[in-house]
């Protein structure tokens, strides 16, 4: 990724967190990044392309952190617990993701992780599937991977308790699904 692309993605993420999709203006993204509006259009095509690029960039940041944590612990379930803890804690710190999940200033962004969130679900499921495949070779792990990712996203969207309870629920479901 070029320096300009990174600056544009950071500027867009900040503005999206503050104003949502409908409040995002390409000229403001350009101004914050110190480039022309045409540069933003050349880089991303349109506002939708810019928002999709921000979503892809944020997703990759999360998936890199998740994959790192999945590889740090030899116990597959403790590794999953660590990865989900990272996800939940990172979400609390990330202005854009918090705005998306709470709807505060960005209620129009929720579809990017729900009805239009297929890229997030697909790539997160792949990371968890690879982890489970390393620990349970020859087993069919896709259903467990997708179920646990969907459950973790559900806990992020609508928390029903504290972080430890949510992680316990996700890992418990993963274990039961693997044993089925």
Image (cartoon, rainbow, N blue to C red):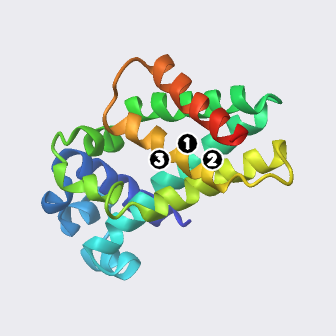
Q: CA distance from mark 1 to mark 3?
A: 5 Å
Label at residue 144: 2
Label at residue 133: none
Which residue is at a point 62% across and 47% down the rendered structure image? 144
On screen, residue 137 versus residue 168, left or right, reads right
Query: SS class of the residue under badge 2?
Result: helix
- Residue identifier under label 1: 148
Q: Are marks 1 and 3 in contact (CB under 8 Å)?
A: yes
On screen, residue 179 versus residue 111, left or right, reads right
Q: Are marks 2 and 1 in contact (CB under 8 Å)?
A: yes
Query: SS class of the residue under badge 3?
Result: helix
Query: SS class of the residue under badge 1?
Result: helix
Q: CA distance from mark 2 to mark 3?
A: 10 Å
| Front-lying residue, 7 or 117 | 117
Residue 134 position, x and y percent, is: 83, 47
- Residue identifier under label 3: 150
Q: Residues within 10 Å of mark 3 (few under 14, many from 20)?
A: some
Residue 94 showing in the rendered view: no
Q: Is residue 36 above or below residue 121?
A: below
Residue 60 showing in the rendered view: yes
| Front-lying residue, 92 or 158 | 158
Residue 54 position, x and y percent, is: 40, 60
User: Could you say which quadrant of the image residue 8 lies in?
Assistant: bottom left
Q: Nearer the viewer, mark 2 or mark 3?
A: 2
């Amino acid at each position: 990724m070029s320096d300009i692309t990174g600056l544009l993605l950071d500027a867009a993420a900040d503005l999206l967190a503050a104003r949502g999709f409908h409040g995002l203006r390409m000229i403001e993204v350009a101004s914050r990044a110190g480039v022309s509006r045409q540069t933003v259009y050349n880089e991303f095509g349109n506002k939708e392309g810019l928002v999709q690029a921000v979503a892809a960039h944020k997703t990759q940041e999360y998936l890199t952190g998740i994959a790192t944590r999945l590889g740090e612990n030899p116990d597959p379930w403790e590794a999953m617990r660590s990865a989900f803890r990272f996800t939940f804690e990172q979400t609390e710190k990330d202005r854009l993701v918090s705005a998306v999940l709470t709807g505060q200033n960005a209620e129009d962004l929720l579809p990017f992780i729900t009805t239009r969130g297929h890229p997030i679900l697909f790539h997160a499921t792949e990371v968890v599937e690879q982890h489970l495949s390393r620990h349970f070779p020859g087993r069919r792990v896709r259903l467990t991977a997708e179920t646990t990712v969907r459950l973790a996203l559900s806990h992020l969207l609508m928390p029903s308790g504290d972080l430890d309870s949510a992680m316990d629920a996700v890992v418990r479901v993963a274990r039961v699904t693997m044993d089925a």
